[in-house]
Structure formats: C-alpha cells, structure tokens
Amino acid sequence: MRVDIATRLDRGRMALATTLLGWLVEALGRTWRIEVVEGRKHLDALSAGGPPAILAFWHDQVIPGAYYTGVRMARKGGVDVTALTSRSGDGELVARIMHRWGARVVRGSSSAGGREAVWDLRAVVRRHGSCPILVPDGPRGPARHLKRGILVLARMSGASVLAMGFAPDRHWRLNSWDRMIIPKPFTRVRLCVRRFEVGGRSGRDLSDERAGRVSGGANRDGQHPLQSLLNEVTRCAERAGQAT
C-alpha cells in the first residue's frame, strides 16, 4: 500500500516524540528512590505469579505511576501489565511508550471506546493473567473523581483493585486540570498500596452503570469507598515523607 509523504512525516514525528519522551521519563525515573512504605506484599504477590489485579492511581500521579508499573513492574519485575490509553494523539504517545517498556496496550477511555476497552481488558485478565493499569479520573477529570469503568471491569473480571498512592519529596506541579506532579531528579518517591475488593453485580449496580453512575455504596461523605481509598493511599505516602 502506498503511503503519502505527510503520513510518513507524521509517523516519523510520533516515533521521535515517543523515543525522546520515553527516554526522558525513564532517565528521570532512574534517579528516583522509590520506597514502598505500605503494601509491599501485594506487589510481591504479583511478581511471584499470583492472581492478577487492577493497578489504579490518580491522574496527577500518572508520571511516577506509569514509570513504576511500566519499567519497575513490567520490564524489570516480569509482571504482565496492560495499559489503558485514550484514542487521542496523547493516548497514542503514551501507548507507544508503555509498549516500549513491555506492557500490553488497550485503547479506549470513558469518552470514546470505553465499552470495547472494558471487554478487551477483561480478556487480557482472564486469558493472560495480565494486570490492567487504570487511571480512574482520566482522561479529562474531574480530578480525583472516580469513574465507573474500573468498578465494571473489577466485577466482570473478578480481579481485585490495588489502590496506589505516589508522593515525591520534591516535585514540579503543572498548571493542568489535574495539577500533575513530576518528581524532581534524585528525589525519594513514597508508594502506598492497599487492596480493594469489588462485590458481585446486583440489579441495582447494573442500573447504576447503565445510567452512568458510580455504584457500590457511598461513604458518609458521599464518596465511593474506592475513591476514598485512593485518596487515603496518597495521604499515606505523603505522611511517610513528612515523618522523615
């Protein structure tokens, strides 16, 4: 098939951007001292070939989260992971970087291709024992507001969720919708991990999912327990840094 010059140039720019950004994040990540302050046993179980789990962290922590799950867990730790990325140009860039680090990739998001993506993720969990990486408030927010996709996937796949919270001692914070953090070179990054089990599907759950609501019971503050847990593990990692 004949490919025009513009397409080749676009592919060339994407390949160059992937190489440069992937190299930059990986080079930066190699200088970080990542310390698991809680939940090491959950990560060790995955490294030992235990049942797969859904790996979840907030969008503002996507840079340390992607590095840790992609480089430390997939490439170096031998854990089979699958990254969910959007169908946008940014998603394509992230997909290429994660694939370069050894992760499987599924395309889709809450705004486009979400239903197909959930079924694809269910398949990689059940057929390959892969651990999906989900950012429950992505790709557009609101920040730290849980979307229903992760709960649907947990019920369909039977996998538990590992809520992960990353907190660097020193970082830059971007002026973006999620206030994304970029850990500075040679900083210590604390990681807190806790397990969350999603119950079976009930008639009420299915109705809520079709209506686009997060189901499963809310806390007194109106938040879903998994949303609260993701906030708690982030605070856990932050407190560990303040205690030193």
Image (cartoon, grey):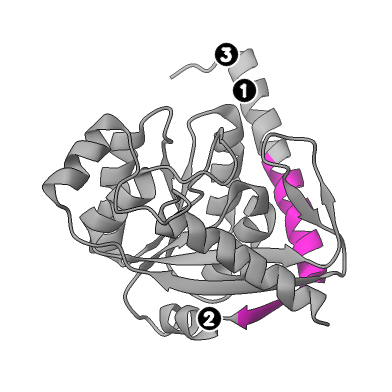
Q: Residue at horizontal 79%, vertical 61%?
A: 27
Q: Is residue 47 left or right of residue 182?
A: left
Identify the image quadrant of the C terminus: bottom right
As helix, strand or loop, the secondary structure at mark 2 comes to loop
**Depth check: 130 or 240 in front?**
240
Residue indicated by mark 1: 8
- In the image, 185 versus 234, the foreground residue is 234
Q: SS class of the residue under badge 1? A: helix
Q: Is residue 219 rendered to the left or right of residue 11?
A: left
Kind of residue sitting beneath label 1: Arg
Separation of residues labelled 3 and 1 (CA atoms): 6 Å
The quadrant holding residue 142 is: top right
Determine the residue positioned at 65% across, 81% down: 37
Magenta stretch: give its range: 18-37
The residue positioned 62% from the left and 59% from the top of the image is 65
Q: Nearer the viewer, mark 1 or mark 2?
A: 2
Instruction: Name the magenta segment's main secondary structure.
Output: helix
Q: Which mark is residue 4?
A: 3
Judged from the image, the secondary structure of the residue bearing numbered disc 3 is: loop
Q: Nearer the viewer, residue 220 or 218?
A: 220
Would you say the residues marked 1 and 2 are in contact, meaning their CB atoms lie under 8 Å apart? no
Badge 2, how many Cα within 10 Å: few under 14, some, many 20+? Answer: some
Residue type highlighted by circle 2 = Gly
In x, y percent, where is residue 164? Answer: 55, 65
> Is 127 or 184 nearer to us in this picture?
184
The reply to whether the magenta stretch includes residue 36 is yes
Mark 1 and mark 2 lie on one chain; the one further toward the N terminus is 1
- Residue 69 part of the magenta segment: no
For label 2, the residue is 39
Q: Is residue 102 among the parts visible in the rendering? A: no
x, y percent for residue 216: 29, 53
